Image (spheres, grey):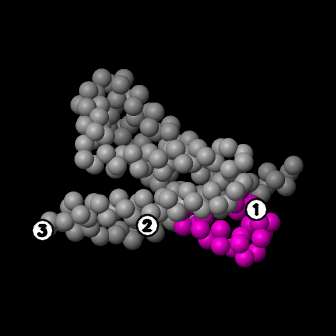
């Protein structure tokens, strides 16, 4: 497999994974508010599906990171390795570290049985995602605020990702409910 094909495959997987995270960023606070109003039993299936999707997206994220590192190592791509090391050690280190914490480290907390049932942990993670992504966007606007550069939100892409998330969520919810009824 050449590098271009590998990149296309990983970017497609990352796009879907990013859609899941974006959808969960919106859904988890809504589930939290409804759960506070209606009670835990009202949305237990939705909460369980959301937690499972977060954990699955976390595993996909780590799989992509490991695949990219392995592919760069296998191809002896020293320039990519040097670029990543320089980027991590440079002034914009947070652009790699924050997504790694958001999508890799924090969702690992939801594998701990005592924490995965606590909706406050899920809400805290979602709020951290929202705040850190807004901070990254703010930083990008500060450093790229020169003539000719405009930072615009791409609402069509957000709509596409949310639609993709809703499709994945509904499909996963239907599968989860069917498996729950069989047992």
- The residue wearing badge 3 is 147
Q: CA distance from mark 3 to mark 2?
A: 26 Å
- Which residue is depicted at the point 40% across and 34% down? 68
In the image, 97 versus 8, the foreground residue is: 97
Q: Earlier in the sequence, mark 3 or mark 1?
A: 1
Query: What is the number of the mark on residue 158?
Result: 2
Q: Earlier in the sequence, mark 3 or mark 2?
A: 3
In the image, 1 versus 14, the foreground residue is: 14
SS under mark 3: loop
Q: CA distance from mark 2 to mark 1?
A: 27 Å
Residue 102 picture location, percent across and down: 48, 51
For label 2, the crowd category at 10 Å Cα-Cα, with few meaning under 14, some 14 to 19 and many 20 or more, is some
Residue 34 included in the magenta stretch of the image: yes
In the picture, which quadrant includes the N terminus? top left
SS under mark 1: helix
- Which residue is depicted at the point 25% across and 47% down? 91
- The residue wearing badge 1 is 44
């Amino acid at each position: 497999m050449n590098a271009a094909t590998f990149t296309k495959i990983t970017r497609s997987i990352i796009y879907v994974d990013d859609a899941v995270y974006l959808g969960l960023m919106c859904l988890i606070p809504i589930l939290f508010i409804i759960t506070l109003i209606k009670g835990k039993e009202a949305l237990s299936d939705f909460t369980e599906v959301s937690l499972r999707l977060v954990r699955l997206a976390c595993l996909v994220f780590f799989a992509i990171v490991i695949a990219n590192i392995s592919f760069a190592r296998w191809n002896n791509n020293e320039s990519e390795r040097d670029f990543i090391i320089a980027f991590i050690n440079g002034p914009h280190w947070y652009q790699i570290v924050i997504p790694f914490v958001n999508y890799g480290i924090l969702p690992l907390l939801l594998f701990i049985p005592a924490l995965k049932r606590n909706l406050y942990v899920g809400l805290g993670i979602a709020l951290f995602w929202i705040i850190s992504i807004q901070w990254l966007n703010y930083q990008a606007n500060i450093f790229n605020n020169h003539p000719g550069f405009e930072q615009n939100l791409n609402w069509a892409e957000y709509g596409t990702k949310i639609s993709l998330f809703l499709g994945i969520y509904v499909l996963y919810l239907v599968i989860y409910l069917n498996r729950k009824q069989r047992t």
